[in-house]
């Protein structure tokens, strides 16, 4: 009988100790977001506890309606402050955190050469270029499903006639469409 009480006591102590341990925060398994400011859609997939792959497509106007960027981009992200956010009782759902990333963008620039700025005419020039480099950024997903993101960093720009350094950046304001925690 005495052994039963001792075993029962240690069982409850171990369960209570396990219940007091904090669960390590982790990124979501997957999530899809839609941005409205610079129209884009992106999909982010978990690789491990705090690393993700993100791929997306976007459309951007350029200048005074004189051109249009379309492109695809990819990030390999490392979220580095999820534990700190959890300790401060801040939201980490929807990959709400700061990150460092390696980004690759492939963009096509279509520029009209006409005075009426009609992109559907045959008098256009089309140019592809690549941008690659590290970025720092943050992403916040609020309970209302609003998604806010910002990233910036240096980029190596490569096209047929130019190779040089520039700054790449992105601002996103949109919605969390769906995903898995």
Image: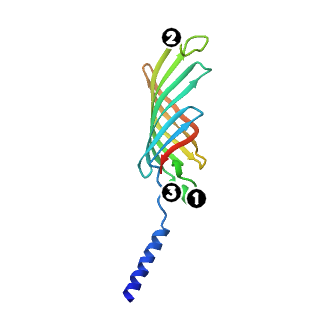
Q: Earlier in the sequence, mark 3 or mark 1?
A: 3
From mark 1 to mark 2, how far is it between C-alphas? 56 Å
Determine the residue positioned at 54% across, 34% down. Answer: 169
Q: Earlier in the sequence, mark 1 or mark 2?
A: 1
Give the image location of residue 48, x and y in percent.
Answer: 40, 50
Q: Is residue 84 above or below residue 165?
A: below
Mark 2 secondary-structure assignment: loop
Can you tell which quarter of the image residue 139 is in?
top right
Using residue 30 as the reference point, say whether residue 150 is left or right of it.
right
Give the image location of residue 12, x and y in percent.
Answer: 45, 77
Residue linked to disc 1: 89
Can you tell which quarter of the image residue 160 is in?
top left
Give the image location of residue 135, x and y in percent.
Answer: 49, 39
Which residue is at the front of the view, 176 or 59?
A: 176
Give the image location of residue 114, x and y in percent.
Answer: 57, 10
Can you tell which quarter of the image residue 156 is in?
top left
From mark 2 to mark 3, how far is it between C-alphas? 54 Å
Categorize mark 1 by other alpha carbons within 10 Å: few (<14), some (14-19), many (20+).
Answer: few
Residue linked to disc 2: 122
* Labelled disc at residue 83: 3
């Amino acid at each position: 009988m005495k052994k039963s009480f001792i075993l029962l006591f240690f069982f409850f102590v171990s369960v209570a100790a396990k219940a007091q341990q904090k669960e390590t925060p982790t990124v979501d398994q997957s999530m899809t977001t839609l941005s409205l400011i610079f129209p884009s859609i992106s999909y982010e997939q978990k690789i491990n506890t705090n690393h993700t792959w993100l791929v997306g497509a976007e459309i951007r106007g350029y200048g005074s309606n004189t051109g249009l960027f379309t492109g695809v981009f990819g990030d390999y992200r490392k979220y580095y402050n999820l534990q700190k956010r959890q300790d401060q009782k801040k939201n980490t759902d929807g990959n709400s955190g700061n990150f460092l990333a390696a980004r690759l963008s492939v963009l096509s620039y279509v520029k009209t050469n006409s005075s009426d700025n009609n992109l559907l005419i045959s008098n256009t020039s089309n140019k592809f270029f690549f941008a690659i480099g590290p970025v720092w950024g943050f992403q916040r997903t609020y309970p209302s499903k609003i998604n806010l993101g910002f990233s910036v960093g240096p980029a190596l720009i490569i096209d047929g006639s130019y190779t040089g350094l520039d700054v790449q950046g992105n601002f996103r304001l949109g919605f969390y469409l769906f995903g898995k925690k």
